[in-house]
Structures are given as structure tokens and as C-alpha cells.
Image (cartoon, rainbow, N blue to C red):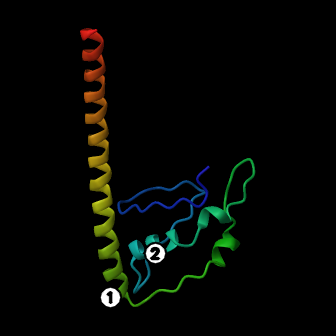
Amino acid sequence: GTAGALYFVSEPCWPIDTTFFAKPKNDVSLQFVYYLLQTKGLPRLAIVTGVPGINRTTLTNVNVQLPPLKTQKQIVAKLSAVQEYKTQLLAQKSKLKELFDSVLNKSMKGEMVTK
């Protein structure tokens, strides 16, 4: 169900046999490749059958152009900062929802008690 989904894992891991993974080469930032592949619409390349998947040949036809490593790192720094900010905003949103729900529940219970 997650054909084309991307995950960035920086610690040692053991992907299952149906997982595609990337190994670093010279002058390549894997984080840059991760962000770049997010723009390639990989889920739309999935073959939807009993077990959704992406054909290896289909992936080799995805055009990927890499800028110099210095540029890759600059882009990653910017995108990582935006991602961190997004994470913080989502955490705040979750806390605000909890606060709203708490106030709502207390208000409704209080309203029912006074009537």
C-alpha cells in the first residue's frame, strides 16, 4: 500500500527484499536525493495489483539531475530548516486542538450542570 513512499533513514537498518534503497556515491547528498525524489511523483508509477509495487525498470527511467555537492548541501539545509519549522507548527496545532477539546468538554459539562 505504500509503493512510491519515501523514507529517509540515517541509522543502520535492514530493509525488506521489496524495498528499493540508495547508497551514497561521491558528490551526492542522500538527503538531497530524498528531497529530489519527493518531486518525482513516485506513487503514480506504482503498479496497482494484489501487492502494489514499482518496477525497477520504471525507476531507472526517472530523470534525476544532481547539482554540485555544495549546492545540494545548501538546498538540504534550507529544506531541513523548513521541515523542522513544519514539525514545530504541527506539534503546536496538536496542542491547540487538545486545549480546544478540553475547554469545549469542560464548557459543555459546565453548561449542562447549570441548566
Element class at badge 1: helix
Three-letter code, disc 1: Lys
Q: Residue at x 46, y 75 (%)?
A: 33
Packing grade of label 1 (10 A; few <14, some 14-19, many >=20) is few
Q: Are marks 1 and 2 in contact (CB under 8 Å)?
A: no
- Residue kind at label 2, given as amino acid type: Val
Figure check: 85 above or below 35: above
Q: On the picture, is 101 further left or further right than 19?
A: left
Between 72 and 39, the one lying in front of the other is 39
Q: Quadrant of residue 57?
A: bottom right
Q: Earlier in the sequence, mark 1 or mark 2?
A: 2
29 relative to 18, above or below: below
Residue 64 in picture, x, y percent from top left: 55, 82
Cα separation, mark 1 vs mark 2, equals 14 Å
Q: Residue at x 41, y 82 (%)?
A: 28
Q: Secondary structure at mark 2?
A: helix
Query: Residue at 59% of width from left, 56% of height from top?
Result: 17
Q: Residues within 10 Å of mark 2 (few under 14, many from 20)?
A: some
Counting from the top left corner in percent of width and height, residue 73 is at 32, 81
For this orientation, the residue located farthest to the bottom is 68
Image quarter of residue 76: bottom left
Q: Residue furthest right?
A: 49
Which residue is label 1 attached to?
70
Q: Which residue is mark 2?
A: 33
| Left or right placement of residue 5 versus residue 48 in this view | left
